[in-house]
């Protein structure tokens, strides 16, 4: 595995590969903010299966954190990450510097208007603008044929798909199911912030979503009723506060009143102590 910091060097390294068999060779790209867990490694696995060369980036992107959020505290462990990626047979680890990605005077941002204002966008209004900006920059640098994202950040995946369609970026976006710990908690680099007590309390999030999934299967399709059910479950658990529970159209992320079993995103965010956790399930395909 080659570890590369400068994007000039990365372009040089990938050039012969891109030119050697134009139109035939595929490059899979897994953008991450590091502190890798099995969720990230599944993205790598999928890229390895589907493409000829896999590039993983690690960059904790400041523009997707608002002032007061956990940018400084965000967990980092490059040595461990590099070891995990090497073991998985990743070809290139791209680890750009802050100065390269956001040099002084940096001024350009990409925003997918309405999709970034709902769900997580309500409490994190600048978050998705930071995500789309860094993802587009990385896609422009790596020029992959395929890029891989986890469905835990379902809104992020929907927004990135829309961005690459709207801006004619020639990349196929692939999404991979949520990976969970045996107790049901969705894997997240932020789970490390949880105390033992908080972690136990946090399990109400996957449990309540699973209850909604069951109720939908049994025919409860009224969105208000489902949201109330979720609220009742979570409100019973101290330490956990609901940020949102929403059932929305899977493509437009617009409000719905009745669940469409083929095209609905059921997404929730909660705060457990200082930690914000998200989780969801999807009825349909993204
Ligand atoms: O999902 C993430 O880890 C980040 O939002 C991403 C896509 C790497 C952009 O910084």
Image (tube, rainbow, N blue to C red):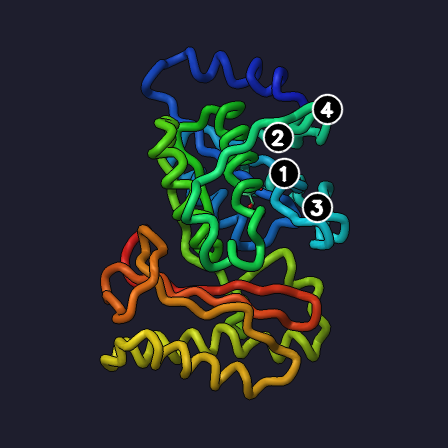
Q: Earlier in the sequence, mark 3 or mark 4?
A: 3
Q: Residue at x 48, y 73 (%)?
A: 206
How far apart marks 3 and 4 lie (CA) works out to 30 Å
| Residue under pointer 4 | 104
Would you name the residue on which mark 1 appears? Answer: 58
Q: Position of residue 126 (x, y in %)?
A: 58, 47
Sequence order check, earlier mark of 1 and 4? 1
- Front: mark 2 or 4: 4
Earlier in the chain: of badge 2 and badge 1, it is 1
Would you name the residue on which mark 2 appears?
Answer: 94
Instruction: Measuring from the top left, give residue 164's x and y in whole percent.
Output: 39, 34
Mark 1 to mark 4: distance in Å?
21 Å
Sequence order check: which comes first, mark 3 or mark 1?
1
* CA gap, disc 3 and disc 1: 12 Å
Q: Are marks 2 and 1 in contact (CB under 8 Å)?
A: yes
Rendered image quadrant of residue 133 = top right
What residue do we see at 41% from left, 83% from top?
A: 229
């Amino acid at each position: 595995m080659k570890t590369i910091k400068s994007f000039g060097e990365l372009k040089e390294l990938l050039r012969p590969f891109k030119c050697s068999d134009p139109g035939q060779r595929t490059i899979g790209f897994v953008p991450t903010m590091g502190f890798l867990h099995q969720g990230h490694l599944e993205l790598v696995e999928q890229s390895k299966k589907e493409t000829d060369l896999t590039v993983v980036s690690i960059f904790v992107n400041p523009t997707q954190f608002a002032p007061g959020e956990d940018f400084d505290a965000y967990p980092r462990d490059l040595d461990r990450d590099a070891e995990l990626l090497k073991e998985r047979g990743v070809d290139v680890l791209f680890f750009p510097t802050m100065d390269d990605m956001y040099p002084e005077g940096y001024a350009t941002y990409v925003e997918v208007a309405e999709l970034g204002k709902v769900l997580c966008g309500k409490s994190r209004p600048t978050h998705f603008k930071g995500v789309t900006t860094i993802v587009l920059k990385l896609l422009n640098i790596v020029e992959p044929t395929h890029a891989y994202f986890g469905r835990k950040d379902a809104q992020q995946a929907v927004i990135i798909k829309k961005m690459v369609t709207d801006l004619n970026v020639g990349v196929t976006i692939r999404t991979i199911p949520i990976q969970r710990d045996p107790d049901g908690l969705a894997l997240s680099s932020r789970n490390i912030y949880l105390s033992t007590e908080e972690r136990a309390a946090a399990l109400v999030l996957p449990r309540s979503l699973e209850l909604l999934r069951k109720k939908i299967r049994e025919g409860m399709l009224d969105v208000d009723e489902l949201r109330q059910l979720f609220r009742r479950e979570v409100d019973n658990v101290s330490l956990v506060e609901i940020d949102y529970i929403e059932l929305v159209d899977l493509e437009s992320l617009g409000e719905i009143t009745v669940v469409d079993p083929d095209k609905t995103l059921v997404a929730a965010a909660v705060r457990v102590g200082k930690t914000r956790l998200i989780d969801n399930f999807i009825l349909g395909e993204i």
